[in-house]
Every structure is written in structure tokens, then in C-alpha cells.
Amino acid sequence: MNTTTAFAIAMSFGTGNLSPDDVAAVSPALDHYIKHTIAQDLWHRPGLSARDRSLITVTAVITRNQTVLLDEQLRLALDNGVKPAELSETIAHLAFYAGLGNALTATSVARQVFAERHIGADQLPTVDVIKLPLDEEVEDARAKAVEQMTGPAAPGLVRDTTDVLFRDLWLRPDLQPRDRSLVTVAALISAGQSAQIPYHLNRAMDSGLTREQAQEVISHLAYYAGWPNAFSASAIARDVFDRRDGKK
Amino acid sequence: MNTTTAFAIAMSFGTGNLSPDDVAAVSPALDHYIKHTIAQDLWHRPGLSARDRSLITVTAVITRNQTVLLDEQLRLALDNGVKPAELSETIAHLAFYAGLGNALTATSVARQVFAERHIGADQLPTVDVIKLPLDEEVEDARAKAVEQMTGPAAPGLVRDTTDVLFRDLWLRPDLQPRDRSLVTVAALISAGQSAQIPYHLNRAMDSGLTREQAQEVISHLAYYAGWPNAFSASAIARDVFDRRDGKK
Amino acid sequence: MNTTTAFAIAMSFGTGNLSPDDVAAVSPALDHYIKHTIAQDLWHRPGLSARDRSLITVTAVITRNQTVLLDEQLRLALDNGVKPAELSETIAHLAFYAGLGNALTATSVARQVFAERHIGADQLPTVDVIKLPLDEEVEDARAKAVEQMTGPAAPGLVRDTTDVLFRDLWLRPDLQPRDRSLVTVAALISAGQSAQIPYHLNRAMDSGLTREQAQEVISHLAYYAGWPNAFSASAIARDVFDRRDGKK
């Protein structure tokens, strides 16, 4: 990473493809919120590491197809310790959980960022990787639940969910299960997809995401996916937490 | 259609405005899924013709405003037998079911594709067309249901739904009722709009969409609108199928 | 505002960054609907002023990130009497209610429109403004409801909702409470966020939005956010109206 780039990031942190002056020329208040509330406060709060904040922000930006922030957030993610291999897997994962077009738009920007930072094939996961071991019990329970709920409506979807997703994509090792679940939960929150949050939030917590981290994921995403999505997610998360506590 | 264009499409199928090399430079796995799971498998599965797959994919891409895939999918739709007049009507239809801005973004790309393929006014439906006959009984039932549900909240919306949509747009003959319903259902799934799926899925099936086709619409759209939207739609579709079977 | 610009707006009204000829070359029907149903009819209907229609259309376009209409609608808003200070506050407000990326995309276009019309810092609200008085009773009730519903799931979100939103952003005086609520309701409808509509629609009506205006907001947004979002909102609004009438 050369000096000019580092400087450019430092100067533009939070304002995406715009300069802070551009923002101030339209809304001095927004410029202030970005510099103080978001850059100086939000990203440094306890409860979630800068690395995790980057992973979920990149996810939110890709899921919402917000090109204005893609370049900045992909660079920032690398600076915050998200590995190129993890970004690569995150984009492939979101082809399924956000949609192919979202992943391709992200790819077009990531292509440039990777080139500029000399990130080549040697740092990226290949097609054929040694997959993580499958927990057959967990997978059987998942497959049965999906078959019962979705089977009669979309048999092809049920097959792809098993063959393409849970017996292939989810077993790719360069994005750890906890992080893959974190990306999935962040995508669901960012798209306002409440119905699938309980399954994936539970799975994320079963894979090591702490409750404090989950809470802070929602609070963080309010800024990048909008308050309404954060509120909808928190109503669902409260229910998930209560059930895990045996309250329901 | 000239040779260069045909070659460009063949080379880029599935990767939109990017080249497959661009995709592989970021995620070899995504490149693999696009070439094998999507291009070689999904588009050739039984249950739904390539022409219908194109119609719903164009709809998903327009509804989700994914410019990265617009050009490729509009060209592919023409190659797969969707007529220019049908694309023209699909875009106008989605001005109402996805929003005006989505239709205009699609128009800006379709304008170039049409020009390149020498598709002129003679191949497009005019403003004044001989409308399809109206089934007054079906339309009265629809109008009464909307009046009861929506009337007190938005009288202007109720009027426009009758005058602009069901007594005008829906009667335009260059997109057959079955296809117009298919486009509507695909738009609702792609936008995660569950509430209106039952009415329009039933209408689509009443107009000739088979259950097998409906099932495959959901499975196909998982790739273009994301798994969460497909899962939400399948829960609704299962209920629609059960009711049509007299199970509820 | 110079003559060329005024002419350009008059020529393109409704078709965003495209010319009406571009639209007609793809869909003569869409060109017709834009010129007649939308430009000549919708925008002139009683029930909602052109100024309010502009405020909610700008909100819809920002919330849905539809760059094709941003330039036209920001200019039209200024022409329809929305003050630069109000646009500035609307964009900052939507950073929270639609997401930061949406506000930044809007800022990049507004920057150019403001520059062209010589709108400088003297016409924009500063960071430090004399805030509107806080209605402690209303705010306490709101904070308690959010604490009860959201608190255990996202304590950080609860704090930010109080400190950043309701004790800061909402008290900025250059967007009146009625207009700020109108923008919020329009954002919720445009994003299909039904869950928060009851609270904000009630708040908007408590701040002076009439029922007739609220009804016409939904009818108007059908064209810019799509019919499905308008239908979903009307089901919620009917319930809100019934409760205000003591029917529930």
C-alpha cells in the first residue's frame, strides 16, 4: 500500500467516493455526524472489533449495492485486518445471500483494489479447497426443516440449498463458520429480511459470536443499513436471546 | 446482431459488465459457480423454458436496479426469444410494480441494445393498442377486495389501480396475461414483497402458469434476488398451493 | 437559475437523466404514462401540494438510491419551493433513516445542483443550530417504548436513538417537525418498512399532517416506490386511521 493511497483513505474515511468538503457543501450536519459520531465514536466502541465492523459494513454495502461506499470500505476492511481471502469468500457468499448482481458489482471494485495492492491469485482461495468437516447432525436438522417448510413450494431451491450452499459454499475454509454466519446475519439485517434472522443468528452464536457482539452488530448496522432495518432486527434478536435464555 | 456482439455475449454470459477473468481475479469460486452452477446447470434445467427464465431474470435485474447485469440480460432475453415488444411492455409494467426509476434505468440500457440491433418503432407497441377483453367478473372481485382493504387509506391509489393498471396497462396485448402475471410475481419475489404474492401467484396460475413453472421461478430467482427472498416466497407459495389443493 | 437549465428541466420532467425521446424509443406506453398520468395529472392533484410531493419524491428517490431521477427531482424540489436548507436537512435525516450510503449518493448530485444554482454556505444550516424545544413527555414515552422493545437486543442502538436522533437530529430547526415526520414516513413506505410506519405516521399527524395529505402521500409514492410498497403501506395506514378514530 503506497503513501498516497493511505493518505486518500485517511482523508475520505466515512465519505466514500466524496471528499468531506463535498459533504459539507451540501450538509455541514452530515459532515459532522460522519466525522464525529461515526468515524471517531462508532468504529471505536467496545463490543465489536474494527475487523468485525469492517466485515459487516462491507456486507451491508454489498447487500445494498451502494457503490459510493464500496471502494472505501473494501480498502478499510483490508486495513482493519480482513484478509484478501476472506473478502474473496465474502463476495462469493453474498452472490447467494444478496444476489448475483450485488456480488458482481462488488467484484468490479474489488478487482481494482486487489490490483492496486498487488493481491494476486496466491492470496485467494482456489475453486478446489479442502473443505471443513461437515457436522452431519446439524446439517440433517437444517435439511429436514427446509424440506418441511420449502420443499413443496420449490424442490429445486431445496436441492441447491443443500448441494450448493451447505455441502459446498459453507464448508469453504477461508471464511470461518463464525464469520460466514456473521456475514449472513449482516446481509439479512441490511436487506430487511427478518424471517431468516432467527436461524442464522442462532447459528452464528453457536459458532462463537457472543451476545455482546450480536448486539453491537445491530447497533453498528443502523448507520449503514438505516435505523428501520436495525429496529426490525432488534425485535427479532430480542426473541432469539429470550429463547436461548429459556424464557420462551 | 453482428458477430462482435454475439461473441461478447458468449464470453460474458453470467458475469454482466465484467469479464470472467475479472471475476476470477477476485473470487475463483464465484467464477466457478457462475460458469457451472448457473450458466451450465440452472439455465438448462427442466421446469421452465430459457425464454421464461430470461423474462424473470430481466424482471429481477430491473426490480433490483442492478445495472451490472442489465445489458447482458436484456441481450440474452432477445436471444432466448423474448420479443422486443414484450421487453418494451415488461419495462413499462415494472414502472408501476417496481417503481418509475427502475424502469427508467432499464430504459437507458434497453435504448442502446435496441439501437444496436436495429429494433425500431415498427417492432414496438404503440400507445393506442386494441386492448384485450376485460373479464368483468374477475375485475369486479379484484376492485372490491382492493376497495375494502385499501380504500379508506388511499382513495387515489384505489382509483389508479383500477383506471391506470387493471383497465389499461394489464389489457395491453403485447405481453400476454400469463407473462404479465409472471413478471409481476417475479418482481414481488425480487423485492421481498410477500404480501401481494398470493393474489398475483393465483392470478398467474389462473392464466396458465403451471405449478412446476411456479416452483422453478422461485428456485431460479434465488440466484438473482438472493436466497432470503426465495425462501420468503416459498413459504407463501406453499400456502397458495395448499389452498388451491383445498388443503386449507 | 439560467435559461438553459430551466429549459432542460421542462423538457425532461419525469424522465430523469433520459430524454422523452429515449423513453419513447423503448416504450411509447411508458413515455405516455410519464407525460400524462404522472406529469400532467398526478403532480397536480388536490390533497397534497407540489412542494410536499417534491419532498416525498426526493425522499423516495434517495431511499431507493435511484440515481437516474436524483438530478431531476432535486432541481424540481427547489423549483417547487423546497428550500436549500430543507433539502440539506432531508439528506442528513436520510443518512439515518435510509442509510449513510444513500445520503452520500444524494450528496454527490446535490453538490452539483447547489453549485450550479449558487447555493452557498449562507443558505445552509450550520452544525450548531439553536435546537427546537424538546417535548419531554413525548420523548419520555418514546424512549420508554424503545427501551422496552429494543433495549435487551441492542443497547447501543437505544442510546444512539435517544442521543443522536431524538435529542439532536430531530430538534434541528431547518426542517420542521411535520416535514421531518413526512420525510420519515415517505422513507419507510419507499423501503417497504411497515413495522415503523404506525409510530411515525401518528407522529406526523400529531405534528400537523392531515389525513387527506397522508392518503395522498401513499397514492403518490405508488409511482415512485412501486405499487407493492404503496399497498403494504395502505394496509398499515388504514389501521392507524381506525385507531385514531377510536374504532380499534
Image: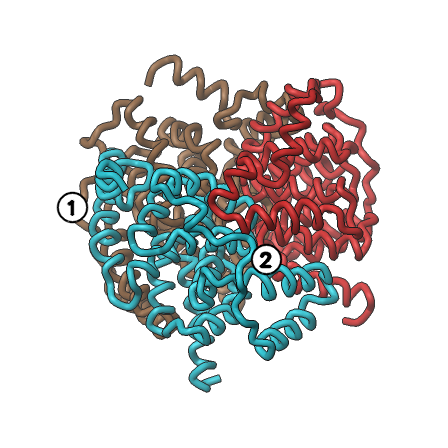
Chain colours: A red, B brown, C cyan
| Secondary element type, mark 2 | helix
Q: Chain of mark 1?
A: B
Measure the alpha-carbon separation of dots 1 and 2.
45 Å
Q: Inspect the image, locate mark 2, and give the three-letter code of the amino acid beneath it.
A: Trp
Number of marks in the rendered image: 2
- In the displayed orientation, state which residue is furthest to the bottom: C246
**Disc 2 target residue:** A227
Q: Nearer the viewer, mark 1 or mark 2?
A: 2
Q: Position of residue B128 (x, y in %)?
A: 16, 46
Q: Residues within 10 Å of mark 1 (few under 14, many from 20)?
A: few
Q: Which of the image's four quarters has the N terminus of chain C?
A: top left
- In the displayed orientation, state which residue is furthest to the top: B3
| Relative horizontal placement of residue C208, taking residue A170 as reference (left or right) | left
User: Residue at left 59%, top 79%?
Assistant: C137
Residue B104 picture quarter: top left
Q: Is residue A210 above or below residue C211?
A: above
**Disc 1 target residue:** B128
> Mark 1–mark 2 contact, CB under 8 Å?
no
User: Residue at left 75%, top 54%?
Assistant: A214
Q: Nearer the viewer, residue C60 or A235?
A: C60
Q: Chain of mark 2?
A: A
| Relative horizontal placement of residue B108, taking residue C142 as reference (left or right) | left
User: Residue at left 47%, top 67%?
Assistant: C177
Q: Position of residue A112 (x, y in %)?
A: 60, 23
Q: Position of residue C115 (x, y in %)?
A: 39, 39
